[in-house]
Image: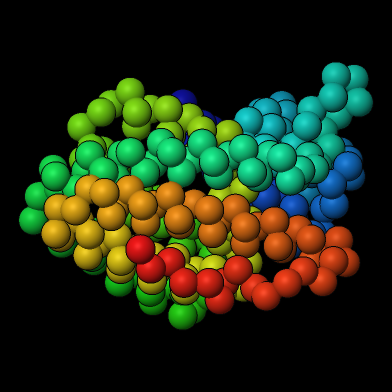
Amino acid sequence: MKSKPIERHQTLREKILETIREAILKGNLKPGEKVAEPELAERFGISRTPIREAFRQLESEGYLTVIPRKGAVVAALSEQDVQEYYAIKSILEGYAAELAADKLSEKELEKLEAINERLRQLAEEGDVKTFYRVHNEFHELFLKACGNSKLVELIQQLGMKFNRLRMASLSVNGRMDISVTEHDKLLEAFRKHDGATAENLVKKTAAIGGKVLLESLTQAEGGKGKKSILEERIDV
């Protein structure tokens, strides 16, 4: 009897999270803009408690800043945030890829290839939201294969804190296509059990992800920028 209210609560909470995330990523909610609890409460027909719970999660993901007695505002994405996150990501995930190259089984490699084919299809369809979820599955598989649970835990904690950056980077036009190409090259290195190449590829991928996002932010602010980073090659 108690499971139904909980299930409804979780469904509504997810809808709130999705609504706010999409509004921020699409630019409908700007940095510094307040996210109004009363409007959300009225829209979803619920109390403010689940809304505040959603705000706390979105704050942990880098979307919002919750100010005591003032409410939640959209967090600004700084150049420093982007640079620091992708620098750390490149080191940790690069090391994990190097370890995984020697340990991935044939079954795991086949699964990675199947996931990347799914990503190729999603990129063609332009489905960023599903692409992001499946993209995470690809990375989680080889991360777990690295055999270092503490390393995986650190990467996952970092990823949760910067979900917004990862989603924003994949949302940039053309980024999903290049992500699939990056995975193709990584899979080739995994097949050869070439840890050094796998590490180098993941590091370059992270660097491109950060540059793409910075380029997007510059353009959003009216900057012209130079030749698109999406045109760069990631050959090792």
The spot of residue 153 in percent (x, y) is 38, 27
- Residue that appears at 47% across and 62% down: 130
Is residue 179 at all visible to an observer of this figure? yes
Residue positioned 89% across, 44% down in the render: 33
Left or right for 29, reference 8: right
Quadrant into which the N terminus falls: top left
Give residue 47's quadrant in the image: top right
Q: Identify the colour scheme used.
A: rainbow
Q: Position of residue 115 (x, y in %)?
A: 29, 63
- Residue 71 drawn at (x, y percent): 86, 29
Q: Is residue 216 left or right of residue 171?
A: right
115 left or right of 164?
A: left
Residue drawn 25% across the image and 28% down it: 148
Where 162 sits versus 114, above or below? Answer: above
The residue sitting at the left extreme is 106
Q: Residue at x 64, y 43 (%)?
A: 83
Quadrant in which the C terminus appears: bottom left
Closer to us: 133 or 159: 159
The percent position of residue 69, horizontal first and vertical second, equals: 90, 20
Whether residue 167 is visible: no
Which residue is outermost to the top? 68
Q: From the viewer's perspective, is 38 left or right of 6? A: right
What is the count of numbered marks? 0
Task: State the image quarter where residue 64 is shown.
Answer: top right
Say if 9 sits above or below 149 in the image. below
